[in-house]
Amino acid sequence: MAPSTSSTVTLNINGEKHTLSVDHRTTLLDALRERLDLTGTKKGCDQGQCGACTVLVDGRRTVSCLQLAVASQEREITTVEGLAEGERLHPVQRAFLDLDGFQCGYCTPGQICSAVAVIEEHAAGWPSAVTEDVRPEAGPPPLTPEEIRERMSGNLCRCGAYGQIVQAVARAAAAGTPTEGAAA
Amino acid sequence: MREFDYRRADDVSGAVALLGADPDARYLGGGTNLVDLMKTGVERPARIVDVRALPLDRIEPAGDGGLRIGATVTNSDLAAHPGVRDRYPALTQAVLAGASGQLRNMATVGGNLLQRTRCGYFTDVTKPCNKRAPGSGCPAVEGEHRNHAVLGASEHCVAVHPSDMGVALTAFDAVVSYETADGPGELPLADFYLPVGDTPHRETALPPGALITGVTLPPAPVAARSRYRKVRERASYAFAIGSVAGALDVSGGVVRDVRLALGAVASRPWRARAAERVLTGAPATAEYFAAAADAELAAARPLPDNGHKVTLMRNLVVSVLSELAEEAAR
């Protein structure tokens, strides 16, 4: 096969398939924003350091600025536009609104996508860098503010809305956890 | 960014064949380091061979309680694995101390070992750097080197290896498996990174075109009581100023077995064998822990602006070993 610097790819985004020709240098972030008009995902540092471009790839949070579009085929991509069910906001979106988890809003789509995954990772029993005992028999750590801050540390907010972001993540996590009464 | 050809490999031999040991081609794992370096022009491959979909994403038991970790296992999956958390907790702690949740979901074990230094001169293509442009010089020796090496460096390069994972793997005697066109091979992690000398651009002993296929952790009962401690300039999501992976087996107040490796002090994760020799069979007391740290750090050659690292590492070693000893006494 002769070398080629572009390819036709099919991207599965928010349940819809999009076929487009991309220069191999195109990141998933640029494909979303510049080619597919999905501008909810934001470009911050473009170096994988700020988290503004966070999307879910096969359910896992990913910085789309370091993910090549050509390497994103056959994977399920969820952006902030794909979280709500029609007019019904995702519980994390609802919590960010109710608790003022933002000021300017630029980092918010990344914060929200990240938080959705944080809650799932915690529910799956993943420890974090602040988890005292990581051994399986210690059980999953409670999702304390300290745990939330550590797990959300890949999302920077230059307005400094962290206090409310932590509260919003905690509320959304609690909302998704059935209490004993609810489960009975 | 330079334009490049992109190929996706379906199997290991196919990946090796697609790369063809071409110095202008690169394997792509999670891309968290390579894509970033391509954006800044440090890396300018003409061809990318995507190995992310290779069937190397499993963690399996290996001989008498060891683990074999596939090269495309993500940092997240490695850290969350019950066998790792149970038998090598310092490895989970080390992985979780690195990067962010997003990056750990993307980054792979093979890529982690091959990630490049974050030295500011290396990542800035407008500056000289012997690692990036051999023979161009090392501005860090007289320039910004607060976070640079204090052990095993040379006048040609004082950059440090940035991996947290690699520090724990080094403490636990991990062995790297790879594949080449001529067949498979293995390298203990202790021999994986080359001494700096006057060839800082040659970082590993991997043959040209080799693809890392996995990392094997031999059984190490001592690792069940282990810790990773990292010091950085903020509470989370930063590279280390210094780090320690330690494991300790104490009985009757005497050290029966010990593993110690230091991070962010050298061009590679630094196994502290001199310290281990002092400790083996010695009383498990702070006095001996300090003597062990001193034995290791006797070889330290700090630069004008990073002498604090020697003190920091001494304190880190003593505190990690003291905590492990306390835990053992409980």
Image: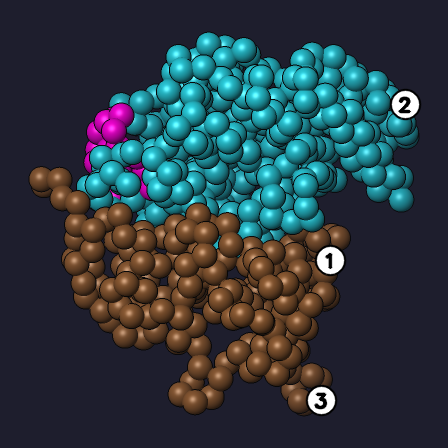
Chain colours: A brown, B cyan
Q: Chain of mark 3?
A: A
Amino acid found under the numbered disc labelled 2? Glu
Image coordinates of residue B214 in percent, x first then y, are 44, 37
Comparing labels 2 and 1, the label whose residue is closer to the camera = 2
Badge 1 crowding class, 10 Å Cα cut-off, few under 14, some 14 to 19, many 20 or more, is few
Instruction: State whether discs 2 and 1 lie on one chain.
Output: no
Question: Which residue is painted at 22% across and 40% down in the image?
Answer: B4
Quadrant holding the C terminus of chain B: top right
Amino acid found under the numbered disc labelled 1? Ala
Q: Which residues are magenta?
A: B9-29
Q: Which residue is mark 2?
A: B287
Question: Which residue is painted at 55% across and 35% down in the image?
Answer: B163
Disc 2 from disc 1: Cα separation: 32 Å
Q: Which mark is residue A181?
A: 3
Instruction: State whether discs 3 and 1 lie on one chain.
Output: yes
Question: Which residue is painted at 61% across and 73% down in the image?
Answer: A101
Residue B273 magenta: no
Q: Which mark is residue A138?
A: 1
Residue B159 sits in which quadrant? Answer: top right
Image coordinates of residue A140 in percent, x first then y, are 68, 63
Q: Nearer the viewer, residue B253 or A143?
A: A143
Say which element carries label 3: helix
Tell me: B210 left or right of A127. Answer: left
Image coordinates of residue B181 in percent, x first then y, are 25, 26
Q: Chain of mark 2?
A: B
- Residues at marks 2 and 3 touching, judged by CB atoms closer than 8 Å: no
Residue A78 sits in which quadrant? Answer: bottom left
Q: Chain of mark 1?
A: A
Residue furthest out toward the left: A2
Amino acid found under the numbered disc labelled 3? Gly
Disc 2 from disc 3: Cα separation: 55 Å
